[in-house]
Amino acid sequence: QTNQFADAVSAIPGIVHHYMDQQMKEAVREAVQIQTDRLQDSLQRENDEFLRNIDENMKKALVEAYEADKAILDTYRDSTILKRRREDDDQEGPSAVPNRGSKRQKEGGEQASASTPSEKATR
């Protein structure tokens, strides 16, 4: 019986060591998990902020590109309209131009009659 008691007493340090080892492993695992979760949350916030900045910059770039394209198209449209008007005027020739007064009136000779206001006065 003493032999069994001695064996049991001598086994206690091994059992305690094994128990403490398991407890330490669990405590370390929990601490690592908590720290990992914190780091993941922090990195996720940084990533979200980075993506928000990229999204903002992309939107700004798209708006600027749209505005530039719109300005180019407006300019092109205006120049096309002017070109068409010139072409239409060229095709109509001088007879189609409305009578804006005789050559003498344009040169400052005879004045237009008092009953009809001059073109400059109506504008």
Image (tube, grey):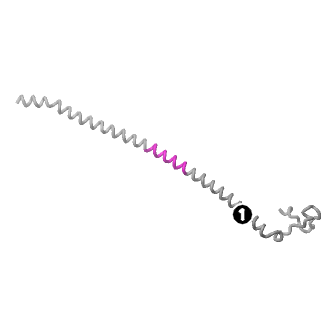
Q: Residue at x 9, y 28 (%)?
A: 6
Locate residue 105 relative to residue 87 in the image: left or right. right
Relative depth, front residue between 70 and 5: 70
Judged from this view, the residue extending furthest toward the right is: 110
Looking at the rendering, in which quadrant would you find the N terminus?
top left
Name the residue beneath numbered marker 1: 81
Locate residue 113 relative to residue 17 in the image: left or right. right
Q: Residue at x 68, y 59 (%)?
A: 76
Query: Could you tell me residue 9's position as x and y percent?
Result: 12, 29
Query: Could you tell me residue 25's position as x and y percent?
Result: 27, 36
Query: Could you tell me residue 96's position as x and y percent?
Result: 81, 71
Q: Quadrant of residue 74?
A: bottom right
Is 57 a magenta residue?
yes
Q: Main secondary structure of the magenta part?
A: helix
Q: Decide: is 7 above or below 91.
A: above
- State which region is magenta: 44-58
Q: Quadrant of residue 37?
A: top left
Query: Could you tell me residue 99's position as x and y percent?
Result: 86, 69
